[in-house]
Amino acid sequence: MKLCDFGGSSIDQSLSSAIYEVFTGSEPYLDKRGSVIEGLYRQKIFPDVSSIGILGRVIHKCCNLEFD
């Protein structure tokens, strides 16, 4: 079971998006829409999370499927 994934469609897979939004105040890729965002996620291109400290590392690990 994956803990989370920016592009996930289930509750546990979208945890990283929720954490990102809570701590940055905006959705991931707020300036982009639909298929563009999906394409970025498929290419494993995720928003920069380095500025939000340890939670940024958690999000990074989530979206790169480094948690089980």
Image (cartoon, rainbow, N blue to C red):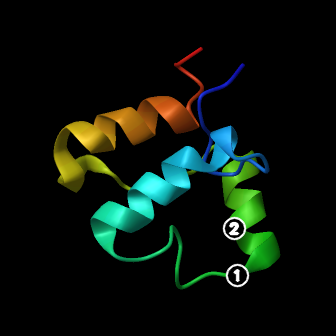
Q: Residue at x 60, y 25 (%)?
A: 65
> Relative to the observer, which residue lies in front, 57 or 4?
4
* Mark 2 and mark 1 residues within 8 Å of each other at the beta carbon: yes
In the image, residue 44 lies at what x, y percent?
63, 43
Label 2 packing within 10 angstroms: few (<14), some (14-19), many (20+): some
In the image, residue 57 lies at what x, y percent?
31, 35
> Relative to the observer, which residue lies in front, 13 or 41?
13
Q: Residue at x 42, y 53 (%)?
A: 19
Mark 2 lies on residue: 37
* Drawn side of residue 33 relative to residue 48, left or right: right
- Residue at disc 2, secondary structure: helix
Q: Residue at x 53, y 72 (%)?
A: 29
* Drawn side of residue 24 relative to residue 26, left or right: left
Q: Which mark is residue 57?
A: none
In the image, residue 62 lies at what x, y percent?
51, 33
- Residue at disc 1, secondary structure: loop
Vertical comparison of 5 with 3: above or below? below
Label 1 packing within 10 angstroms: few (<14), some (14-19), many (20+): few
> Relative to the observer, which residue lies in front, 4 or 43?
4
In the image, residue 68 lies at what x, y percent?
60, 14
Amino acid type at circle 2 is: Ile
Residue 47 seen in the figure: no
Vertical comparison of 43 with 47: above or below? above
Mark 1 lies on residue: 33
